[in-house]
Image (cartoon, rainbow, N blue to C red):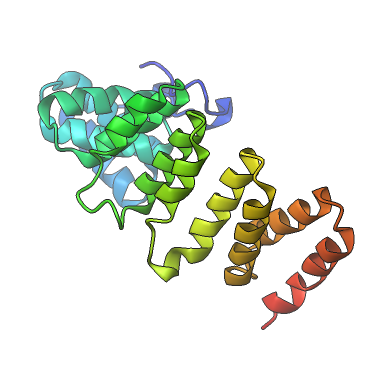
């Protein structure tokens, strides 16, 4: 069996010779189910892949193999399975989401948006698809539309998440006032989230506001102890 995606570190690649594959299809299937129940995504991916090799037209096995590959981070196999799934189940939203990511990696941003538009029925609440769609617009040099897309996330539970990515997008577009406004908003919502705290402090520091950045870092530890 070939190794997993080349993008993964060598020590993390699930390889067939790392697992005790059975000579029987049922044995490998049971091993795949056991690995799934134990949340061992790498093992499940290898075992399901072997079972699918023996029964390539089984749609349930294809779906399980796709999910296992996706969960284990084996995107090369996940993309392959997603292509196969779409041919048999055009409404498979997760497969469309994976293919949208595949298109993004290839800088095919229009194709990515097409796939992402099919990845779920409730576009307003599918925050993953909305976020990815916004970044495809950045790739197409349409940062204004990217921000408008993010602003469709009206639910205030996602406010910090939304504004954090909006700040990054505005920063890429060199829209400094908007980037600072959004980053500050994200920080106010997520003062206990290290990634947001660090991003805001670095943002301020790059703009010559070292004293403000220092205060942001100093306020972080007390917040954690509350």
Q: Is residue 185 above or below residue 124?
A: below
The foreground one among 151 and 107 is 151
Left or right of residue 146, residue 180 in this image: right
**Quarter occupied by the C terminus:** bottom right
Residue 107 in the image, given as x and y percentages of width and height: 46, 22
Name the residue furthest bottom: 226
Left or right of residue 99, residue 26 in this image: left
Residue 171 in the image, given as x and y percentages of width and height: 65, 44
Identify which residue is drawn at 39% across, 59% down.
153
Q: Is residue 53 above or below residue 161?
A: above
Mark yes or no: residue 63 visible.
yes
Quadrant of residue 88 within the rendered picture? top left
**Quarter occupied by the N terminus:** top left
Q: Is residue 191 above or below residue 176?
A: below
Q: Is residue 108 above or below residue 145?
A: above
Left or right of residue 155, residue 213 in this image: right
Mark yes or no: residue 45 visible.
no
Residue 114 in the image, given as x and y percentages of width and height: 28, 31
Left or right of residue 183, residue 159 in this image: left
Identify which residue is drawn at 34% across, 33% down.
113
Identify which residue is drawn at 41% across, 30% down.
74
The foreground one among 106 and 73 is 106
Identify which residue is drawn at 81% across, 50% down.
207
Residue 135 in the image, given as x and y percentages of width and height: 47, 38
């Amino acid at each position: 069996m070939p190794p997993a995606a080349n993008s993964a570190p060598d020590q993390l690649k699930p390889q067939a010779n790392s697992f005790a594959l059975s000579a029987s299809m049922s044995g490998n299937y049971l091993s795949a189910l056991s690995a799934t129940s134990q949340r061992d995504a790498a093992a499940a991916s290898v075992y399901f892949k072997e079972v699918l090799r023996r029964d390539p037209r089984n749609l349930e096995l294809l779906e399980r193999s796709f999910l296992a590959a996706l969960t284990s981070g084996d995107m090369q196999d996940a993309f392959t399975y997603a292509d196969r799934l779409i041919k048999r189940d055009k409404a498979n939203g997760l497969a469309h989401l994976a293919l949208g990511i595949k298109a993004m990696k290839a800088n095919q941003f229009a194709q990515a948006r097409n796939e992402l538009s099919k990845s779920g029925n409730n576009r307003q609440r599918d925050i993953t698809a909305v976020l990815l769609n916004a970044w495809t617009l950045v790739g197409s040099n349409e940062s204004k539309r990217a921000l408008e897309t993010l602003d469709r996330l009206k639910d205030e539970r996602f406010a910090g998440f939304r504004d954090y990515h909006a700040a990054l997008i505005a920063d890429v577009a060199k829209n400094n006032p908007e980037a600072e406004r959004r980053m500050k908003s994200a920080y106010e919502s997520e003062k206990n989230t290290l990634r947001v705290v660090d991003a805001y402090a670095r943002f301020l520091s790059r703009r010559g506001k070292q004293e403000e950045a220092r205060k942001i870092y100093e306020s972080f530890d007390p917040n954690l102890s509350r």
